Image: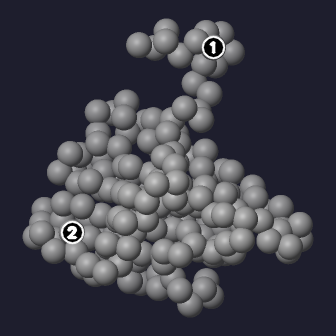
Amino acid sequence: MTDPDIDVSAWRERLADLGAAEVTDAVVVQCGHAWLQPEFTAFRNEVDQALMTAQLRRGDRLAITRIVLHNLPLTPDAAHRPAAVDQAFEEWHHRLSATRVLLCSANASAPRIHRLILRGDQHSAAVPDMVELLKNGDWTDPHQAGLALRTIDTDGATTPLTGYDMDLDGPFGDADPSIYM
């Protein structure tokens, strides 16, 4: 792993703190292009697992807010982007949707996942990758956490990731979602 913006050991320390009773909220931003590179697949999966485990163990006592990319940048070199990046992007969104559906089904408080929309002229996200925790009422980095939360609150900047993207009907299911209500 060679991306200088992702300090793996710092991420692991913060993720380990999610189990602490004094941590009530977490803001996680994963919008850097490195998250979709093959050499980061294992660490991306490790982060997802840590967040899901913390959410299952802590339930309503821990609110997790995540920001991931809604779309990959539309740059001139996008045509030369490795297919593996697009595949990783699709697989990750599918897995995050499935996780959200499963956590809702398990009566756990599902993380709020927001997808950051990159405009046509944007090559990267304006908010840096981070894990910020609210411990005893104080953010580990108030500036960073504030930036991420303001981004979510900005109209048109993000769209929620929901389980509606999941095909849960199976081969014999009714395509009308109201049958599950």
The answer, for residue 81, to whether it is visible in the render is no
**Residue 170 pos. (x, y %):** 64, 19
> Residue placed farthest to the front in the image?
155
- Mark 2 or mark 1, earlier in chain: 2
Residue 42 sits in which quadrant? bottom right
In the depicted view, which residue is nearer to us: 2 or 72?
A: 72
- Residue at 56 percent across and 90 percent down: it is 4
Write the residue at 17% across / 51% down. 61
Cα distance between the residues tagged 2 and 1: 41 Å
Dot 2 alpha-carbon crowd within 10 angstroms: few under 14, some 14 to 19, many 20 or more: many
Please identify the quadrant where the N terminus is shown: bottom right
Residue drawn at x 30%, y 46% is 56
x and y, in percent, of residue 9 in the image = 41, 84
Residue 80, position as x, y percentages in the image? 89, 71
Q: Which mark is residue 134?
A: 2
Q: Quadrant of residue 86?
A: bottom right
**Residue of label 1:** 175
Seen in the picture, residue 7 relative to 107 is either above or below; the reply is: below
Q: Quadrant of the C terminus?
A: top left
Instruction: Give the answer, above or below, for where 102 lies relative to 159.
Output: above
Three-letter code, disc 1: Ala
Extreme-right residue of the structure: 80
Q: Which mark is residue 25?
A: none
Q: Nearer the viewer, residue 3 or 165?
A: 165
What residue lies at 52% left-to-right and 54% top-to-bottom? 156
